[in-house]
Amino acid sequence: MSVNGKRRPLGAAAVGLGALGAGELLAAARGGSMLDGIGRLAADYAPVRVVETMVARAGEHDKETTRLGVALGGIAAAAGIALLPPRLRTPAAAAFGAGVASAALRNANRSVPGAVGGVAAAALLRTGLRRSGGAGSEMRWAAAGIGMLVAAELLVRRADLRYREVARRVGPMGAHVPVPEDGIGVERGLSPLITTTSKFYVADVNSRPPRIDPTQWRLSIGGRVAHHLRLSLADLAEQAVEFDAVMVCVHNTVGSGRCGNARWFGVPLTALLEHAVPESGATRLVTRAVDGYTISLPLEPLRTGEWPGYLVIGMNGEPLPPEHGFPARVFVPGIYGQYSGAKWITELELADDTHVDYWWKRGWPAEPLWVRPQARIDVATCGASGSGKFTVAGVAWAPPHGVARVEIRLDDTEWLPVELGSELAPAAWRRWRTIVDLPPGVHTIQARVTSRSGEVQDAVERPPFPFGPGGLHTVTVIA
Ligand SMILES: Nc1nc2c(c(=O)[nH]1)N[C@H]1C(S)=C(S)[C@@H](COP(=O)(O)O)O[C@H]1N2
Ligand SMILES: [Mo]
């Protein structure tokens, strides 16, 4: 309703919703998204404290949370503009459009449609504020906005599914060797030895993965090298080998699921670096991705193989799925995901120490953080009810050295060794299991792992920022 050019906040929000929906639908029809661009802008500039709180609260729903937050923020901004005096609305709407468009332009390879959507949303907002009036018309704006947002989401999902098929058809990547038994057997709730790809955690700064045409894609190896190389997926597949390793996000606090164990398929970085021949001034290997993200690693230990890194092109016998970095990523087992190489990689650039990484600007340390050994309790269940016999089982990792021992502790008493499954590879996770007898009552069970290099899991609880999480996974059961 507009009285003397003034609007009620709800009516203004309705017009904002309509404009936003139209912009997003326009973007989606051409394979892009305006909201995803704003989400990425937020990820790029949010202070580290905000990022840490968000990751801790939203957990593995961080992407959905970001999208929802962005949509609500967009509606609020549009409503704010509508509530301005009429003469300020045009410049405010123009600034809004420019802001959304420039945010969209940063969004990897989905940018232009998002920018077009942003400009259209701003124009529509301006028109809508001039024309609409009355509660009925506002209801129509709101309903149309919601409808268009839903339609846009469906369109983007459909295009993403189609792209997923394009990526999958590049395969197979790896030998499909059946995963060996580890002797632990089947236990309800216990993680499998190899994490199913569709259940593998996803962590990155984008709302949705960028789309890359595998036939056009080339890995470029450049910067301070004697031989610039450009390699296709087929070139890389010829030199790739399979290896088993756990990948862990630095935000994987005890007991959480931001880690997974996979059979990867990749080319050892030692081989690629040998072909490229680094120049004497090269000290860092910068992994550069299409989403503008970089992770850099010290060159020397990668060149010599002291840190065995890989240019990975496959996961569990298939090409990498889009969300895990299709067509290629860098991975150095034993280093947290945030430090061990970019997904959606386009270039390996050999650089000097002047390079600055994505996260360094927000206070994360420059040197790679190594994964701290961690044991997770997946299962703590009573066999027959009232028997007091509990099966306790889980996974533990200590890459790259391997797991030497896992122990559990009941009610803060002494540490007891548990049975370990056989080891797939030192960098992979290892399953464990034991049976304990518990008297009636409430009990706590804790687990800890010791690495083969002698590092005992640190019991001090610590947040992920800035050196990686610490603490012991603790569960409470009633016998
Ligand atoms: N290009 C790019 N690569 C990235 C990231 C990113 O945001 N962009 N996130 C990193 C982080 S923090 C982690 S934990 C791993 C997660 O890999 P996954 O999603 O396959 O589990 O990717 C890393 N590589
Ligand atoms: Mo991460």
Image: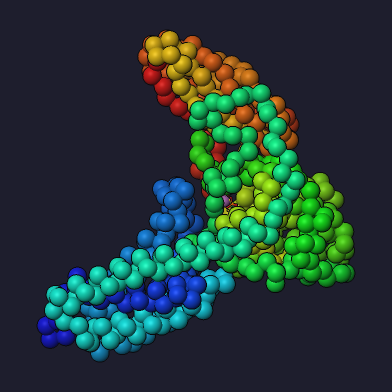
Tell me how many marks there are. Answer: 0
Residue 1, x across and y down, in percent:
14, 78
Classify 135 as above or below 214.
below
Specify the quadrant of the image occupied by residue 211.
Answer: bottom right
Q: Quadrant of ligand 1?
A: bottom right
Q: Between residue 117 and residue 159, name the one nearer to us.
A: 159
Specify the quadrant of the image occupied by residue 176.
Answer: top right
The residue at the point 23 percent across, 87 percent down is: 130
Specify the quadrant of the image occupied by residue 123.
Answer: bottom left
Residue 170, x across and y down, in percent:
68, 60
In the displayed structure, does residue 168 sit left or right of residue 475? right
Classify 459 as above or below 140.
above
In the displayed structure, does residue 274 sit left or right of residue 363? right
Q: Between residue 392 and residue 173, name the one nearer to us.
A: 173
Classify 136 as above or below 264.
below
In the displayed structure, does residue 328 sit left or right of residue 34? right
Residue at the farthest left position: 3
The residue at the point 46 percent across, 63 percent down is: 157
Classify 437 as above or below 274.
above
Residue 121, x across and y down, in percent:
36, 79
Residue 302 makes an appearance in the image: no
Q: Between residue 112 and residue 404, name the one nearer to us.
A: 112
Query: How are the colours assigned in the image?
Result: rainbow
The residue at the point 21 percent across, 86 percent down is: 131
Is the C terminus in the top left, top right, bottom left or bottom right quadrant?
top left
Residue 164, x across and y down, in percent:
57, 60
Residue 136 makes an appearance in the image: yes
